[in-house]
Image: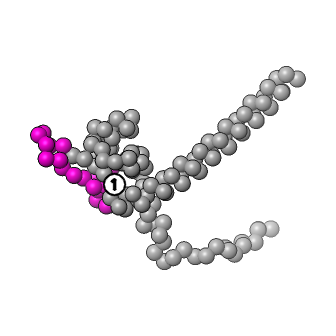
């Protein structure tokens, strides 16, 4: 006998769902890290490359271009010789910091939960070995 399908109790999302507008701003490998490190102030390309060990120059360049196109990052050419470029967060980019902080907070709780589960499993294995 098939299970009865229950009625959804949550409200319908707005027609133009706000999540569909916001999530693309932080999608993509390395994007949250770029935003996070720029939250501390303007950074040059090579400084960000050091901040994000493992990111390739190509990927970092792509992320910065994407974030600039989305209005999250501001690119400023400095009048130096040779010319240098600084990246900083726009007002929109700064609005994303609390979102990243919330994700970090949840992630920390998930890590603690996982560590506690692993400890319980380890203790259970030790008890079984001792008997």
**27 sits left or right of 126 in the view:** left
Q: Position of residue 39 (x, y in %)?
A: 39, 50
**124 sits left or right of 94 in the view:** right
Quadrant housing residue 108: top right
124 in relation to 45, above or below: above
Q: Which residue is mark 1?
A: 89
What stretch of residues is rendered in magenta? Answer: 62-84
Q: Residue at x 67, y 73 (%)?
A: 8
Instruction: Judge by depth and name the residue closer to the eye, 90 or 106.
Output: 90
Q: Position of residue 26 (x, y in %)?
A: 42, 55
115 in relation to 11, above or below: above
Which residue sits furthest front? 41
Q: Is residue 77 magenta?
A: yes
Task: Tell me which colouring the rendered structure shows.
Answer: one colour
Q: Residue at x 39, y 34 (%)?
A: 53
Q: Secondary structure at mark 1?
A: strand
Q: Residue at x 51, y 52 (%)?
A: 101
């Amino acid at each position: 006998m098939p299970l009865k399908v229950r009625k959804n109790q949550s409200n319908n999302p707005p027609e133009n769902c706000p999540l569909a507008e916001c999530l693309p701003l932080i999608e993509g490998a390395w994007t949250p890290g770029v935003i996070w490190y720029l939250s501390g102030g303007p950074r040059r390309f090579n400084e960000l490359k050091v901040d994000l060990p493992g990111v390739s120059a190509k990927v970092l360049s792509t992320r910065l271009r994407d974030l600039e196109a989305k209005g999250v990052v501001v690119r400023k050419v400095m009048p130096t010789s040779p010319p240098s470029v600084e990246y900083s967060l726009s007002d929109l980019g700064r609005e994303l910091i609390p979102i990243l902080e919330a994700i970090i907070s949840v992630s920390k709780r998930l890590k603690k939960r996982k560590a506690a589960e692993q400890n319980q499993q380890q203790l259970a294995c030790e008890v079984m070995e001792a008997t």
